Image (cartoon, rainbow, N blue to C red):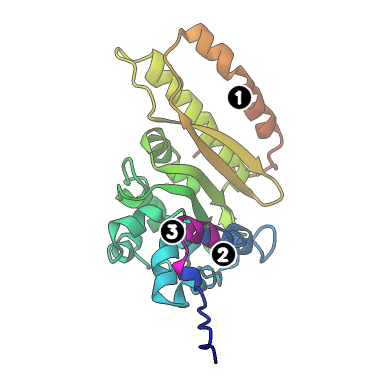
Amino acid sequence: MSAPIQHQKKLGFELPAEIRNQIMEYVFADFDDERRLNRYNSRCIDENHSASRSLQPLLVCKQMYHDGRLLAFNRSTFLVSNLFFHVPDRLSILCEKQTQAIGSIAFLADARHFRKLVRWGAHPFGLSPLNLTTLTIILHRSSFWHYLFDYTSDLVKLLRNLTSVKRLVFIRNGARVKGSFKTWYNRLVGLLLKVDHYERYERAIPNLETTWWAWSYDEAGESFCLEARPSKPLVSEEEYLTGILPLMEELRVSIESEEWNPDPRARNGA
C-alpha cells in the first residue's frame, strides 16, 4: 500500500515579496476616501468619515500589517474632525516611515487653525517628514463667521515657501464666510500674483518663490484647489507679464462672476 500523499497548501504569504506587493495594490486600490469624505452632499463634507475602514485589512494578521501598512497609510485620507485635536502630537507616536507614508490629511479649521497654519514654515504642520499628496482644509460649519480675509496676506507668504504638499484644497463646507468664499479665493489668487511680481522685479535682489501654485475653483462644490508646480524661472519683466496674462484674464472673469455682497469690506479686501 502506497504512502498517503501529503497535500501542502501554499499560503499567500509564502509568495515572493514582489507578488505580495502587487496583491496589496489591489487590496487598497478600491478605497477612495476623498470621494467618501464628500459624500454628505456636494457642498458639505461627511464629518463622520473615518480612515479605519480602509485600514481594516491590516487587522487580518501580523504579516498583512507588515506588508500593507505603508501602502494603506498612503491610500487613506485621515480626517481630523475634532477642533482641539493636535495633529503633530498624534503623529509623533508613529515611526518616521509611517509618517512619511501618509498621503492625505483633511482637517476642520476655525480661526485658531488659520493662525497656526500661517506659521508652519516650509512643511505642513511644521513636520518635515510629511510629504502629502493632498492636504484638505475644511471650514468648520457653525453659527459663527469665518473672517478669512484676515489671513490672506500671511497665507500668501506661507504658500510661496510651502513644500511637501502636491495639492492644497479648501472646502467651504456650508460655513459662514464674511465677504463670501469665492471673493476670498479671488483676493488670495490676486495677491499671490501681486506679491510674486513685487518679489521678482521690485526688490534689489529678486526673491523667487519656492513653489508656484496652479489654481482652480469648483462652483458646485464651493471649494478650490491649489496644485504645486516648480518655481518659475527668472525672466525679463515683459516676458513674465506676457506669460501670466492668461491667468490675469481668468481672474478677471472669476471676479466678475462674484455674487454681489452689500458689505463694503468684501470689495476692498478688508
Q: What crowding class fits label 2: few (fewer than 14 Cα within 10 Å), some (14-19), or many (20 or more)?
A: some
Identify whether 7 is placed above or below 166: below
Asked if residue 145 can be seen in this view, the reply is no
Q: Which residue is mark 1?
A: 247
Q: Which residue is mark 2?
A: 27
Asked if residue 125 can be seen in this view, the reply is yes
Of badges 2 and 1, nearer the viewer stands 2
Q: Amino acid at mark 3?
A: Ala
Q: Foreground: 97 or 198?
A: 97
Q: Which residues are drawn in magenta? A: 14-23
Q: Foreground: 63 or 165?
A: 63
The location of residue 76, given as percent across then percent down, is 51, 61
| Mark sitting earlier along the chain (2/3) | 3
The location of residue 201, given as percent across then percent down, is 40, 13
Residue 213: in magenta span: no
In three-dimensional space, the C-alpha distance between marks 2 and 3, rounded to whole angstroms, equals 15 Å
Q: Amino acid at mark 1?
A: Leu
Q: Pointers 2 and 1 in contact (CB under 8 A)?
A: no
Magenta stretch, main secondary structure, is helix
Element type at mark 2: helix
The location of residue 235, given as percent across then percent down, is 45, 10
Q: Amino acid at mark 2?
A: Val
| Mark sitting earlier along the chain (2/1) | 2
Element type at mark 3: helix
Q: Which residue is mark 3?
A: 17
Q: What crowding class fits label 3: few (fewer than 14 Cα within 10 Å), some (14-19), or many (20 or more)?
A: few
88 relative position to 72: left or right: left
Q: Pointers 2 and 3 in contact (CB under 8 A)?
A: no
Q: Which mark is residue 65?
A: none
Of badges 1 and 3, nearer the viewer stands 3
In three-dimensional space, the C-alpha distance between marks 2 and 1, rounded to whole angstroms, equals 41 Å
Residue 110: quarter of image: bottom left
